[in-house]
Structures are given as structure tokens and as C-alpha cells.
Image (spheres, coloured by chain):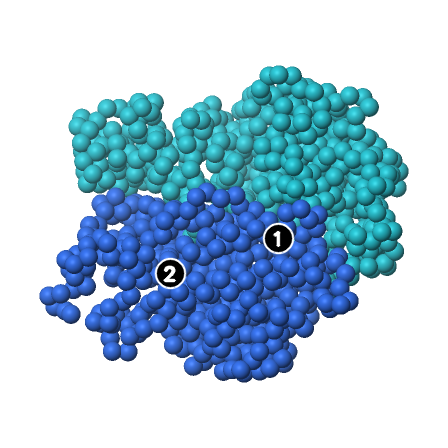
């Protein structure tokens, strides 16, 4: 369609601003023959995300018994039936504590995400997986990554650069909306693009502030210099955001600006958590469709889940330890109530990404999402056989629809696979006994 | 000569005596107290708000979410020397800064801050923007500024003014830049060589001004402190003492005391507290906010207004009340809106901070009380002890069946739990403290029974037995460990780090003096500020090869009960 009829002139001429609200699929004429890239050669972005839920599952009720493509969904995975073909279930992968203590609700998640079990609860032995990936692909978008938590606390986040830098989660749908679609948002499908002089000035100012820190740097010891470095990295990220706002974004047919949500109560009450998760999923999905970020981390509930149900004296975490196993059912029914809700929320998340058409497929097809928990059977803080699922085809690099059973393999094999599926050139990953150079081959298309 | 010979024979003894005398003097002489490394401390959310209010007026709106503060070794104040700024956090600081700057240079407010009038308000005026920055930058950065500090800032202001055709827009940019600079968001401490004591550094005037101000008032240095610092007075004994005593005598000392107790008592965590509305219908966000304020008012009244004994915080019936709180406490409150002084009746179970709604609700589950969590709070926050985490593979189910018909009360359930050998040791440390508070449910309401069974509120603390909140309060009052822990916490709060080994002796001395002077907080704050640890430093802080100790509060709470 070039030259002469650019997509933008087409929109301006025939549809004008209406295109924003219509959410049209991408016109084939704008794509290359394979439908995987813009006609001018820029590929559709591949996004990476994590989706975490706390307090695990019941292994016998959760893990599929059959392996491969035709595996049967178990009772605990039943909510995933509508998205079954979009996901993989991985069982039998462990965090190898490698002689370190099992810090309840910490070792499992940090082992999975950093590749090593922490000697002390506060230790962060390496940057978490999402950061390794966002360091590669996060720079192109307005936000390096977006973090959200449905349980009400910004501290519920497992995105850590090191011990002193934990990326806080957005907990309110309204705040998330305002951050993404508020003031700084440039609609990629807007008819006109006029660079804002305020943004030019802000970028200049922020750069100058960044330069000014040099004198300070010389006065600091190594401990504080590291912290100033983190400050500077954050400042550069804002600079990058401003730069993105100064260049005309390529049009994105899947990008639809959502309506502003109402302010909602945020808490760990299961009803409120489910509602806020759904509202934030909607905003996040469209943030991805509008290419505002390519990396995200969702915490449905924190490790040692503080979810609770109104009217009940005991919450999810306490229940996993204190509730008796029902002899007939073979599991703890009240604790499992929260597992079932978690799986419904995860299924809803996947379904939402799969419902947005993008290129020759869906937004989900251009995503790779890893769902995980900090434990398998929470009652004993078991970090073997951790529940892991992936969703999305990573722009065609990943396959889906499988149950893959490890046999006590280090869970770093999964983390290494995530990095390689996202195009990172990394051959081995993990620390000590968890170091591996063997990705999970069956995940690769 | 004979005498000399005699004395040489005695030389070793004389030397010993001399050494003893020097050591004895040294005990009282600040120069051998020891000190630790300087810190770079991020302003807490509360400090940021107070700082902005003091710089630009308390009607300045602050809109945005602050990066969460992080507790380390039990204190946010220690965590401030560890946290950094994340990308999401910086984005927020930037948005907050721009919003503040726009308000400050608005037509209604600018006259109070801009010391000149531009020749032409539609373009840059280098002289006037420099004058503005020269007056505002030292207050924002808490130090004197150089021409090098100002040059590029003036240039940015001028560029913005000319581009946007608005002189004041230029000032808005310049001020926004100051408010995101690392020297504003962090309190950067600096030492300087001291010829009198070459082994370490004396903190410079600007650092001392900020230390004093944030320690005692929890805010940025006022003009008096900045002026004293500019004249170099804070690095003199007389000048430092003069400013210290001025700050201690001010009613604003209450802000500093409140901030310290908010930190020690973990009141930042009240933000995450939710109580089940079906089980606790009278409990609300408003009640929780009032409960927090009630406790802080009670503390400030006792320690600052009355200059009373710190230990009486655990035995006093004096407090403050609002109508909303009165409903939950079930006490009559006058018709006025707002706060009024209140004394609980002599037969009321509400005695001391440990019986306040704030602490009872904070240390409990959303749906029920927790003797264990309350006991851990006393051990960790009031006694400065670390309670070990429960083993990962512990099984709570046998004894935690809340529907078990034979185990109706928490005491019975925990008793059964405590009979498990692996659990008994730790639970014996904490449960007997918390069980004395079992008459208060998960939201802090009084109750006589649990599941139809009368509650037995006997408890014990370090071998001392008592009954109920009043007995616990008396035990806390009498405990020397509680007073020593307050000293240690206040010290760590003041210097923003753990005590170094060489500072242990100083802590012992502070404890002795605290007790001797009737446990007056103001005197303790004065003694800490006068110590070497507060005014000197060993140098910059370097990364330790092994990662420092674990923060007890960081770990997931695994204790049953």
C-alpha cells in the first residue's frame, strides 16, 4: 500500500477517529505474506509475562495422569477446558534446595524465578526471569514492564532486580488505567501525531538530572553506588518512555482504548480479588495490544496467599495448614476452594488474551505467559513437583496443548526455555545444582 | 633517682592504672564511643509529605503512589538505607514532582516563592530564574548550592520558558528537576576529615542538620537549622547543642516521636489490614485510621507533652477518643466531632498500648485473634528478639481444627499444638504472652467467651506470671529488657543502621542513663544525638561479600494460632 496510501492516510480518510473504537483486525494489505510482520518489515512484538498464584494445589487432583497432546484435564484443571489448546501443563519440575533451608513460601518462588534457592529469606541471588527478558525486549516500549497484584498490596511482587529493588505492583484498576491510558498515552491509531513540546523539555531535563548525579557518585561507597545505579536505570527508563512518546507510533489495529474503570475497594477478600483481577486483566490486555509494554507480571495472590472469604474466620494460607483432609474427597475442601478460584482466574486471563485478534492470530499467540506457584502441596511447603503452566505461542516459537512431565528435573529447565523462546541467546541458566543447559525441548515449535 | 628506680619497678602497675583511668574517662568521653558508616537514606513516604508541606505549605496536594518502604531488621528506618528506586517508582516521583511544581509556581502561590518579577513573563529571564533557584535549591537539597549546581538548572528553566513562552513554566521545570534529583529523594550523608581525630570522619554541617531534623521532627531542616549549618555551627559543640535543644524544646518533637513509634509498632502495615465485614461489622477503614491515631496521640501525650516515664505507656489508662472509636470500645463519647482526651475506667480491661485496637487488630488474622502473632510482636518489637520461623514441614492440622468440639478456645488449641515437640519450643516463647490478650478478638473487641467457653487470660513473660492485659502491661513496665530494646530501636532509628560492635558500650551507657533519668524519652533522644555515633562516621558503606542478616518481618509468617 505504500507509497501513496499509507495506513494512516487510509484511516484518516475513510474512518477517521472511529477506528480507535472499532478494534478492527489488521488489514492483510498491511502485513507481509506470512501475516507475522508489518509490511515494512517490523515484526509483531512477542510479549512475555508471568502469572503467579499462592499456596499451590493438590497434586493428585491437579496433575494430569496422561502425557502429551491428548492429556485429560483433571478436576483441578477443569476450569482451563476452554483454553486447553492454548496452554501447556508442566508437572514434575522441582526447586532443588541445594543444601539451603526451605524458607516457607519464598524458596519455591525465588528458586523458580532466579534459578537458585536463597540462603536467607531476603536474598535475591540473581535478577528474576522477567527482568532478564525485559532487559532484552523491554526498552522498545513506553513501560519496561507492568506489574499488577489482585490482593491489594504493592509489595505483592516477584519482580526483583536484587535485594534492594523490588518492582511494586499496581493494585487498583483505576490507578493502572491512569498510568497506562492516562496523560502520557499516545494512541497509535490517532489520526494526527504532533510531538508535545512539554515532552521534549521533560526529556531534556531528566537527562540533565541523570548527568548531574556523577558528582554524587564519586562520594559514595560501593553499597550506595549500586543503589544510585538502580536510580539511574529507573531514570533512563523514564527518558525512554518520553522518547517513545516523541516518535510517531506505528498503527496497531488491535489497540483499543478501554473505558476508565470505577474506583474499587482493594483487598484480599476473594470476591474483590477476582473482580480487581478481571478489571486489571482487561487493561493489561489492551496495554499489550497497544504495545505500551512487552513484559508483565501478574500476582493473583501472594505466596502464603492472604486470600480469604468474607464470613470465614480462617483464610487460604491458614486453611492449607489447619484444615483436615476430608476423607471422602481426599483433599481439604475449604483450602481447595481458593485453588479452584485461582484456576478460574488464570483461565479467564488466558481467554482474554486469546480473544484479541492480532495479525494472523491472536494477541495470545504473540505472548508467552508462565503461570506458577511457590509450592505444590502448601500444607508442607513442598517445592518439588511445582505447578507450572505456559500459555501462548511466543509468536510461533512455542507449541501448546501439551502435558509435559518432568521427573524431578530442576525447574530452571523451564526458566531457560522461557528465555530461549523469547529469543534470548542464553545457553545455560541457574545456580549451583540448578544450573542447566537443557531446555524443555517439547515446548519449542 | 631512688624514687625513679622505685617507680620503674612499679611501672607495669602504673601503666595498668593509667590505662584503666583512660578507659574509665573514655567511658564518659564521646571520642571513644565508636561510630559506623554513613548512609544514603531514601525519604519515607511520610517524610516526603512532611518535607513538601514544610517547604511549600501544607495545602500543596500530593497525588500519586509512593514506592513502598521496606522494613529491615525490624525498622523501616534501617530499610531506608537499603531500598533504591524502581522504574515504576521513579515514574511516580516524577509525576508527583511535576504536580507539586505546577502548584508552587501557580499565580496564587508564586509570590511566596519567587523573589523577583521577570522583565517579560512570556520568555526566559535568566537573572530571575537564577534568583529563584538560589533561594529554593538549598532548601530542597538541604545544603548550600554552588554555581555549578545552578548553571545547568537555570539553562533548563530558560529553555522551557522560551519554548513554551512562559517564564513561570521555566521555573516549573526547574523545580520539578530539583524534586527528582537523587539528593532530594535520598538523604546523602557526608563525612569530612577531622584533624582532632584522624581515625574517622566527622559528619559535615548539612548532614548533621538533616540528621537532627529527620530524627527529631521527621522533616526537612528548617531555616534556623540550615542557617546554622551554613555558618558551620553544627560542627561545633556549642552550636550543635544549641540547635539540638531548640528542636527538643519544640512541640514538633511530637512528630518525631510519633514517626519513631509508627515505625517500631509496624503501623505502615495497618494499610494492608482488612477485617471480615461479616464477622466484624463495626470495623471499618475509618475506625482503623482513628485507632492508629489514638495510639500515636497517647504516646505523644505521655512522652512529649507530659515528659512522662516511657514504661507507663504499658500501664496508662489515659488516652484519646473519637465518636467512631467510642462505638467499638463501647464507651460514651461527648457530642463533639474530633478528638477528646479520655480515660478508661479503672475496671476497664483497656490498660496500656497493648490493649489498643490498633495493635490488637494488626496482630491478628482477618477473621480471628492470634495469641501467637501478638506474642511474636512483643518479642520482636518490644524485646528486640528474633523468633525463629516455624519449620517448613510442620503439620498444624491435628491441633488447629477450629471445629473440633473438644478444643473450643485458642488456649486449648495451642496447648494441643504445644505438645508437639517440634513446635513446643517456639510456641512457649510467644503464646503465653499473647494468651493474656485473648479476651480481645481479631478486631480488638472485648469478649468474655470463645465458642461458649470462658476465656482464661493467664499469661507469662520471662518467668513472670500474670492475668490479662493489665498484668501483661505491668510485666512490660517492669521489664528492663523492654527499656533496653526501646533504647536500641531509637538508636538504630536515629543512625539508620544496625549498631556496630564498637557501639555496644555506648548502648549500655544510654540504657543506664535512660533508667537513671526516669525513662524520659526527650533525654534519651538528646543523649543519642550527642553521641559520636550520631555525629561521626567510619567512612562510606561498602558492599558486604556475604549478604547481611535476614529481616524477620520479611519472611512469610508461618506460625499457627
**At 66% across and 55% down in the image, what residue appears?**
A316
Give me the C-alpha separation between circle 1 and circle 2.
27 Å
Q: Give the position of the C terminus of chain A as an image quadrant.
A: bottom left
The image position of residue A403, as x and y in percent, is 55, 78
Of the chain colours in the picture, the one used for chain B is: cyan
**At 25% across and 44% down in the image, what residue appears?**
A198
Give me the disc on residue A250: none
Seen in the picture, residue B9 relative to A86 is either above or below; the reply is above
The image position of residue A90, as x and y in percent, is 56, 75
Q: Which chain is blue?
A: A
Could you classify mark 2 by the number of other residues whose Cα lies within 10 Å: few (under 14), some (14-19), or many (20 or more)? many
Q: Mark 2 = which residue?
A: A288
Residue B373 in sight here: yes
Q: What secondary structure is found at the residue carrying circle 2?
A: helix
The image position of residue B369, as x and y in percent, is 74, 43
Chain of the residue displaying label 1? A
Q: Position of B33 compared to A255: left or right?
A: right
Residue B546 in sight here: no
The image position of residue B499, as x and y in percent, is 66, 44
Q: Mark 1 = which residue?
A: A307
Amino acid at each position: 500500500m505504500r507509497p501513496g496510501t499509507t495506513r494512516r492516510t487510509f484511516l484518516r480518510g475513510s474512518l477517521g477517529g472511529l477506528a480507535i473504537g472499532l478494534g478492527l483486525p489488521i488489514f492483510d494489505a498491511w502485513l507481509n505474506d506470512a501475516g507475522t510482520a508489518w509490511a515494512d518489515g517490523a515484526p509483531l512484538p512477542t510479549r512475555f509475562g508471568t502469572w503467579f498464584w499462592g499456596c499451590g494445589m493438590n497434586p493428585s487432583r491437579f496433575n494430569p495422569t496422561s502425557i502429551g497432546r491428548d492429556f485429560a484435564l483433571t478436576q483441578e484443571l477443569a476450569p482451563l477446558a476452554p483454553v486447553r489448546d492454548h496452554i501447556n501443563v508442566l508437572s514434575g519440575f522441582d526447586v532443588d534446595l541445594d543444601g539451603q533451608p526451605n524458607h516457607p513460601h519464598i524458596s519455591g518462588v525465588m528458586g523458580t524465578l532466579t534459578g537458585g534457592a536463597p540462603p536467607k529469606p531476603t536474598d535475591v541471588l540473581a535478577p528474576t526471569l522477567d527482568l532478564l527478558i525485559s532487559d532484552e525486549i523491554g526498552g522498545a516500549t513506553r513501560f519496561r514492564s507492568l506489574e499488577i497484584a489482585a490482593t491489594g498490596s504493592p509489595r505483592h511482587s516477584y519482580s526483583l532486580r536484587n535485594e534492594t529493588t523490588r518492582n511494586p505492583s499496581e493494585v487498583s484498576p483505576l490507578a493502572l488505567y491512569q498510568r497506562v491510558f492516562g496523560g502520557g498515552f499516545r494512541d497509535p491509531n490517532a489520526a494526527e501525531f504532533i510531538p508535545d513540546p512539554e515532552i521534549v523539555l521533560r526529556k531534556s531535563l531528566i537527562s540533565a538530572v541523570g548527568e548531574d548525579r556523577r558528582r554524587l557518585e564519586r562520594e559514595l561507597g560501593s553499597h550506595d553506588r549500586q543503589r544510585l545505579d538502580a536510580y539511574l536505570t529507573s531514570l533512563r527508563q523514564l527518558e525512554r518512555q518520553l522518547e517513545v512518546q516523541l516518535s510517531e507510533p506505528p498503527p496497531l489495529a488491535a489497540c483499543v482504548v478501554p473505558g476508565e474503570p470505577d474506583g474499587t475497594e482493594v483487598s484480599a477478600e476473594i470476591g474483590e480479588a477476582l473482580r480487581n483481577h478481571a478489571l486489571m486483566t482487561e487493561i493489561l490486555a489492551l496495554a499489550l495490544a497497544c504495545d505500551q509494554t512487552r513484559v508483565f507480571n501478574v500476582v493473583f495472590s501472594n505466596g502464603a496467599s492472604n486470600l480469604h472469604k468474607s464470613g470465614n474466620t480462617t483464610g487460604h494460607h491458614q486453611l492449607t495448614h489447619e484444615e483436615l483432609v476430608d476423607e471422602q474427597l481426599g483433599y481439604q475442601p475449604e483450602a481447595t476452594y481458593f485453588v479452584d478460584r485461582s484456576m478460574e482466574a488464570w483461565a479467564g486471563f488466558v481467554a482474554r488474551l486469546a480473544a484479541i485478534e492480532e495479525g494472523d492470530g491472536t494477541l495470545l499467540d504473540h505472548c508467552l505467559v508462565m503461570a506458577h506457584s511457590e509450592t505444590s502441596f502448601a500444607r508442607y511447603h513442598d517445592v518439588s513437583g511445582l505447578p507450572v503452566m505456559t500459555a501462548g505461542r511466543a509468536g510461533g516459537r512455542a507449541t501448546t496443548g501439551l502435558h509435559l512431565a518432568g521427573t524431578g528435573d530442576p525447574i530452571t529447565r523451564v526458566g531457560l526455555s522461557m528465555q530461549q523462546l523469547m529469543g534470548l541467546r542464553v545457553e545455560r541458566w541457574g545456580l549451583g545444582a540448578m544450573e542447566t543447559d537443557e531446555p524443555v525441548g517439547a515446548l519449542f515449535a | 633517682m631512688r624514687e625513679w628506680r622505685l617507680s620503674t619497678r612499679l611501672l607495669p602497675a602504673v601503666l595498668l592504672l593509667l590505662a584503666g583511668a583512660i578507659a574509665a574517662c573514655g567511658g564518659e568521653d564521646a571520642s571513644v564511643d565508636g561510630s559506623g558508616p554513613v548512609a544514603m537514606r531514601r525519604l519515607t513516604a511520610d517524610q516526603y509529605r512532611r518535607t513538601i508541606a514544610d517547604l511549600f505549605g501544607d495545602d500543596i496536594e500530593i497525588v500519586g503512589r509512593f514506592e513502598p518502604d521496606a522494613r529491615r531488621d525490624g525498622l523501616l528506618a534501617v530499610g531506608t538505607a537499603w531500598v533504591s528506586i524502581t522504574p515504576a517508582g521513579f515514574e511516580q516521583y516524577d509525576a508527583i514532582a511535576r504536580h507539586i511544581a505546577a502548584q508552587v509556581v501557580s499565580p496564587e502561590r508564586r509570590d511566596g516563592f519567587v523573589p523577583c518579577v521577570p522583565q517579560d513573563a512570556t520568555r526566559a529571564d535568566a537573572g530571575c530564574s537564577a534568583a529563584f533557584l538560589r533561594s529554593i535549591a538549598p532548601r530542597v537539597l538541604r545544603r548550600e548550592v554552588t554555581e555549578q549546581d545552578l548553571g545547568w538548572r537555570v539553562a533548563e528553566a530558560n529553555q522551557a520558558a522560551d519554548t513554551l513562552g512562559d517564564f513561570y513554566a521555566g521555573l516549573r521545570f526547574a523545580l520539578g528537576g530539583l524534586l527528582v534529583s537523587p539528593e532530594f529523594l535520598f538523604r546523602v550523608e557526608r563525612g569530612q576529615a577531622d584533624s582532632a581525630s584522624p581515625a574517622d570522619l566527622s559528619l559535615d554541617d548539612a548532614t548533621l542538620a538533616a540528621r537532627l531534623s529527620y530524627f527529631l521532627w521527621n522533616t526537612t531542616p528548617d531555616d534556623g537549622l540550615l542557617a546554622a549549618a551554613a555558618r558551620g555551627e553544627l560542627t561545633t559543640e556549642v552550636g550543635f547543642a544549641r540547635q539540638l535543644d531548640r528542636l527538643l524544646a519544640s512541640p514538633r518533637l511530637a512528630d518525631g516521636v510519633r514517626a519513631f513509634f509508627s515505625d517500631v509498632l509496624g503501623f505502615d502495615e495497618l494499610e494492608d489490614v482488612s477485617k471480615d465485614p461479616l464477622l466484624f461489622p463495626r470495623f471499618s477503614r475509618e475506625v482503623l485510621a482513628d485507632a492508629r491515631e489514638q495510639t500515636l496521640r497517647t504516646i505523644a501525650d505521655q512522652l512529649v507533652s507530659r515528659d512522662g516515664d516511657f514504661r507507663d505507656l504499658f500501664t496508662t489508662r489515659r488516652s484519646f477518643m473519637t465518636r467512631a472509636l467510642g462505638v467499638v470500645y463501647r464507651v460514651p463519647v461527648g457530642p463533639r466531632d474530633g478528638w477528646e482526651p479520655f480515660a478508661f475506667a479503672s475496671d476497664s480491661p483497656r490498660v496500656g498500648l497493648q490493649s489498643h485496637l490498633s495493635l490488637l487488630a494488626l496482630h491478628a488474622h482477618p477473621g480471628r485473634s492470634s495469641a501467637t502473632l501478638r506474642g511474636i510482636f512483643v518479642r520482636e518489637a518490644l524485646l528486640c528478639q528474633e523468633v525463629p520461623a516455624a519449620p517448613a514441614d510442620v503439620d498444624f492440622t491435628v491441633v488447629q481444627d477450629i471445629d473440633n468440639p473438644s478444643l473450643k478456645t485458642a488456649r486449648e488449641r495451642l496447648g494441643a499444638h504445644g505438645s508437639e515437640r517440634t513446635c513446643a519450643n517456639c510456641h512457649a516463647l510467644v503464646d503465653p504472652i499473647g494468651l493474656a490478650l485473648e479476651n480481645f478478638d481479631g478486631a480488638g473487641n472485648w469478649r468474655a467467651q470463645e465458642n461458649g467457653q470462658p476465656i482464661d487470660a493467664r499469661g507469662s513473660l520471662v518467668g513472670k506470671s500474670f492475668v490479662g492485659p493489665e498484668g501483661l502491661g505491668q510485666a512490660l513496665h517492669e521489664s528492663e529488657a523492654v527499656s533496653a530494646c526501646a533504647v536500641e530501636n531509637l538508636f538504630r532509628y536515629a543512625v539508620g543502621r544496625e549498631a556496630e560492635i564498637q557501639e555496644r558500650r555506648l548502648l549500655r551507657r544510654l540504657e543506664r542513663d535512660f533508667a537513671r533519668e526516669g525513662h524520659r524519652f526527650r533525654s534519651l533522644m538528646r543523649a543519642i544525638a550527642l553521641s559520636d555515633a550520631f555525629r561521626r562516621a567510619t567512612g562510606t558503606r561498602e558492599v558486604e561479600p556475604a549478604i547481611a542478616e535476614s529481616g524477620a518481618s520479611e519472611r512469610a509468617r508461618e506460625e499457627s494460632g
